[in-house]
Each structure stands twice: as structure tokens, then as C-alpha cells.
Amino acid sequence: MAANASPLGYALLGLLHQREETGYGLQKFFEDSPMGAYSSSPGAIYPALKRLERNGLVVSRLREDGPVKRSKVYSPTPDGTEALTSWLKSEITKHDVETGMDVLMLRFAFYGLLGDRQATRTFLAALAERIEAYLGTLEDTQALLERAGADVHARLALEAGRETYRAQARWARRALNELEGAADER
Amino acid sequence: MAANASPLGYALLGLLHQREETGYGLQKFFEDSPMGAYSSSPGAIYPALKRLERNGLVVSRLREDGPVKRSKVYSPTPDGTEALTSWLKSEITKHDVETGMDVLMLRFAFYGLLGDRQATRTFLAALAERIEAYLGTLEDTQALLERAGADVHARLALEAGRETYRAQARWARRALNELEGAADER
DNA sequence: AAAAACATGTAAGCTGTTACATGATTGG
DNA sequence: CCAATCATGTAACAGCTTACATGTTTTT
């Protein structure tokens, strides 16, 4: 039963698996990368790191060597690795697809850490399926709106949602194909 | 200086502009519509309605007529209409595009309430522009990742983001065209 | 010498989640 | 009569935002 974290917590944990970092370093990374959606401000990052440490998912040590004193470098513990892994591999729920595509993409971005191509393919296949299933229900909703003669704006907004999910399903299928292709090479 | 609300608050306020409703009615609506992303549970909706009422954006009255007693029906006040309007018309920021496309779509869904085609076109044009600008920075990020020889998964995740925003930009442009076309009819 | 960047944190306030608690009304 | 649906709420807890507070090191 691995301890769990918030999306921001997992984002930090994943980054720390790529290289150990200070709170400030992580903050800078968020600032100028699209991952900044999990923002953010020191007021979110420092407490999140403390929580990770309290839960034993990361450890910190003081950096002496570097140019700047008084900075704390965080790195993941075995428990942290386990927590990240089980988060990455956890089932993709309907709820995830409906309200957290960004988090699913964050998860995918860290799949390289698993070093397990089959796991990646499983994830992408499940993701594509789930999205496609949800697209079906969106179609039903649209039919309903159409019949009810809803406002153009509402209908267009729904159309935007469908286009967005369609693009993501297409992406997942394409990524899957690319990886299947890569698997054939040797 | 209109009072402001949370995204859920605005979602509720917008819906109440279409027809007065009880907390339960709103909850049901969220449950089986894609707007359920602004969820949710009674534990979010009832407090949100109370906040709207406290801020003078909605009023409630007890329903006697209907089949069920003891239910409170909410409807917007003039202040509520003003708050909604100014939210709808507020500038689309870079930050909105980077972290809140869903909220922008929610805003668009309510544009019918303004009854102002020009405003809708202005919104869509600004949205398309902002998204396209952000797509430019995503391209730069991708070039960076490419040069740094980043992990396939990270690159694919970024690609997913680009595809998503591209789909949304295309949607905005298409919607704009459709509305321009409609404006020519008389 | 000053400005910018490095670096870490705290506090108040808001909002959301989950879970619980309660009761009336309607349909089978 | 019993289950489902209608209907409203509260309480504990978690997490994020904004703003503040502080001090060092490097660059100009």
C-alpha cells in the first residue's frame, strides 16, 4: 500500500527520478515548461516536497559542493519509486478521462522511467479505448442537445470537447503504432 | 466591480440564467452532462450556492407549488447577471490558455446569454489567436527537447499537448467561420 | 554598488473532496 | 411497504493561490 500524493506531488516525484533537484530548481523547471500547468509557486512546491518527505517518498540532503550554500537537494527513496510506479500503472478510470486528461498525459510522460515497453503499450491501448468510449457518450449528449434545439454556443462548446477528445484518441493510436513499429526493430 | 466566483460558481450562475433551479436539480444536471467536470457533489454545490447568495449574485425562494416541499429554487439577481457578463467578457489571458481551456470553453458555452454575436466573434478570434501563440511556444519547447535528445515518452506527451491545442484552434477558427456565415444571412 | 537570480519558507484564505446525517415523496 | 429518488446540508481534511518575509550569491 504505497502512500499517494497529489498530481503536483507525483509531478515532483517523477522529475526527481530523472535527476535530484532543489525546490527552486523544480520551480524554475515548471516556470518554463508546459508542465507548469501543475504550476507553480513556491507556496505549493515547498509544502508538497515536505509532504513527500514526511511520507518517505523522497529524502533531502544539504548541498555543500555547489556554488550556493543552504540549498536542499531532494531525491526519491525506494518507497517513492514504488509509489510512482504504482501510480503510473494504476487503472485508467472513466473519471480520469472525464476530468483529468492532463494528469493522464503527465503519467504517460513518465512512462520512460518504467523501462517497460509493454507497459507503455498497455497504457496507450487502455487510454485510447477509454477515450473512444467517452466519445460515444458525448455523441449521445450531442444528439440530445440537437433534438432539444439547444443554443448554438452550447452545441459548439460540446463540439469543441469532442474534437479535443478525438485529437487525443488519434494521438494515442498513432503513438501506439509508432511504438509497435519500434518494437519490431532490433 | 462585480463580485467574482469560482469556476463552479460561474457554472452554476450561468445555468441559473437559463432557468431557475434547485441545488439538487443542478447537481443532477452536472451528473449527466459533460459539464460534470465542474463536478459534482452536494458538498461543493450547496456551499457554492450559499456563497453566490451571500455575495448577492443569486436569490433563493422556497418552492410551494411543485410536488416536493422544502426545496429552494435559486435565480440570478441583476448583480449576478453583471458578474456573469463581465466574467464572460473578461480578457483571455495566456494563463487561461495554459491552464484553463476547460474554463474558457465553459465561458463560451454561456455566450448565448449575451445575445451579442459580435461579442461571440470577438471572443473566438481572441481565443484562436491566444491558442496559436501558445502553439508557437510549444514548438520551441519541442525543438529544445529534440535537441536535448529527451525521452520518447516526454516528446510524445508534448506532441499530445500540441495536437490538443491544434484541435482547439481549428475548432475556434471553424466556429468563427460558421458564425460569420450566419451573420450574412438575414 | 545595485540588480538579478538563487534559495527557502510561512500564513491566511478559499475551494474542493469524501463521508456522513437527515428526512420527505413517489413508484412499484 | 420498501426502494429509489428528491432534497438539503455539515464536518474533517487536503491542497492550492496569493502575498509576505528573509537572506545569499552572482552578474552587471
Image (cartoon, coloured by chain):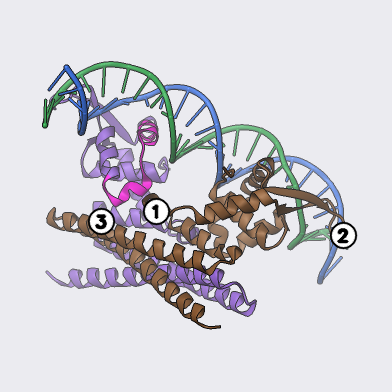
Chain colours: A purple, B brown, C blue, D green
Which residue type does callout 3 highlight?
A: Thr
Verify CB contact (< 8 Å) between mark 3 and mark 2: no
Measure the C-alpha gap from mark 3 to mark 1: 21 Å
Tell which of B31 and D16 is nearer to you.
D16
Check the picture and name the quadrant holding the C terminus of chain B. bottom right
Q: Is residue A15 left or right of residue B128?
A: left
Question: Which marked residue is nearer to the observer: mark 3 or mark 2?
Answer: 3
Crowding at label 1, few (<14), some or many (≥20) Cα neighbours within 10 Å?
some
Verify CB contact (< 8 Å) between mark 3 and mark 1: no
Residue numbers of the magenta segment: A32-52
Measure the C-alpha gap from mark 2 to mark 1: 46 Å
Measure the C-alpha gap from mark 3 to mark 2: 57 Å
Q: Is A34 within the magenta?
A: yes
The picture places residue B154, in percent across and down from the top left corner, at 25, 56
Residue position for label 1: A103
Which residue type does callout 1 highlight?
A: Val
Question: Circle 2 sits in a helix, a strand or a loop, which is it?
Answer: loop
Give the main secondary structure of the magenta stretch. Answer: helix
